[in-house]
Image: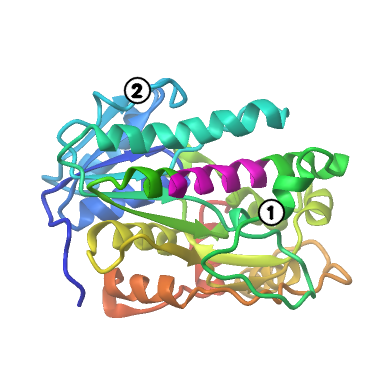
Amino acid sequence: MPTLALHPSATVFVTGVNGLIGSHIADQLLARGYHVRGAVRDVEKSGWLTEYFENKHKGAKFELTAVPDMTVEGCYDNVVKGADGFVHVASPLTGTDPKVAIPIAVNGGLNALKAAAKTPSIKRVVYTSSSIASTFPKPNVEFSIDETSYNEEALKGVWDPPEDLKGLYIYAALKTETEKALWKWVGENQPNFVVNSVLPNANFGPVLVSEQQGAPSTIEWAKSAFTGEHFEMLAKRITPQWYIDTIDTALIHVGALIYSDVSSERLFAFAEPFNWNQLLAVYRKIYPERRFPKDLEGLGVDRCRVPNERAEEVLRWVKDGGQGWTRLEESLREMVRAFV
């Protein structure tokens, strides 16, 4: 086993802790004996999360702190004091003008690093990037990405994208520019803490508290295929790509945070490719009595070769039983319990 850089009882600051991935990261840290301080916009509105963790993790230390606007300079400076680790999950998504949205996202990410640099106790920082910061999915096209890959196509195309893909290009560009800016800052400033990034693809799997969180982020994609609501429209827009289980994503973040062996790395959290017909096949297997949308023609498959071996290695270090990727059927089985 690798060496621990952060030991249980250390305090970890987690942004976006009430979201899909942030809540799972906090859950997995608390289960391992770490203290968690979670940032949300409104502490009172997220009180359900404190109640949930107090009931689930007896004796664990979890607290919420308010950061109303993560784009304000110095927004984390006071609330991160005394923390040993920083997991920056939250990402501002503002407007449809890339001239506005991209700088806001970049500044939001840099605020995290600048706050960590002002906090002597911080030893480790993990940033939640995205698969789309490395490439767009390209069904049936054989190509490769590596640890140096960034979505240059998005950076060029965001200024004149296809109208129906404008939102996708803006999201891809802001995630790409933010991660590039973070690594540039690290190279120029040589901080006294280690930085790692995690690039997850589409997340399917259990939502921690579905009664409060609903079907957030890419869970909504899978729910649409399950219920049929807006499915045809969504399927035209979302092409075949890779997926990862929600808990696996959280565990890779935990590994990147606590193990000294993971240092200055980009971890590609890609479990395996999927397309809509594969989701529908699993649903029919689990619920043979239900009716689901018909299979779609000409979907293809994502043939991109990705450097995901290191992410799976880190996952095995931290996962109970030392297992690798959670398979699609298992992820969907856990997820759809909230839909029925």
Vertically, is 121 above or below 296?
Answer: above
Which residue is rendered at x = 88% and y = 72% of the image?
298
Q: Position of residue 325 (x, y in %)?
A: 45, 75
Marker disc for residue 51: none
- Range of magenta residues: 171-184
Q: Position of residue 99 (x, y in %)?
A: 69, 28
Specify the amino acid type for callout 1. Answer: Glu
Distance Cα–Cα, label 1 vs label 2: 30 Å
**Label 2 secondary element:** loop
Query: What residue does disc 1 label?
Result: 152
Viewer can see residue 208? no
**Label 1 secondary element:** helix
Query: How many labels sit on residues?
Result: 2
The quadrant of the image that shows the N terminus is bottom left
- Which residue is farthest front? 188
Vertically, is 290 above or below 144?
Answer: above
Q: Quadrant of residue 136?
A: bottom right
Give the colouring mode of the picture. Answer: rainbow
| Residue 30 lies within the magenta run | no
1 vs 2, front mark: 1
Query: What residue does disc 2 label?
Result: 74
Q: Is residue 334 left or right of residue 300?
A: left
Of helix, strand and loop, which mostly describes the magenta segment?
A: helix
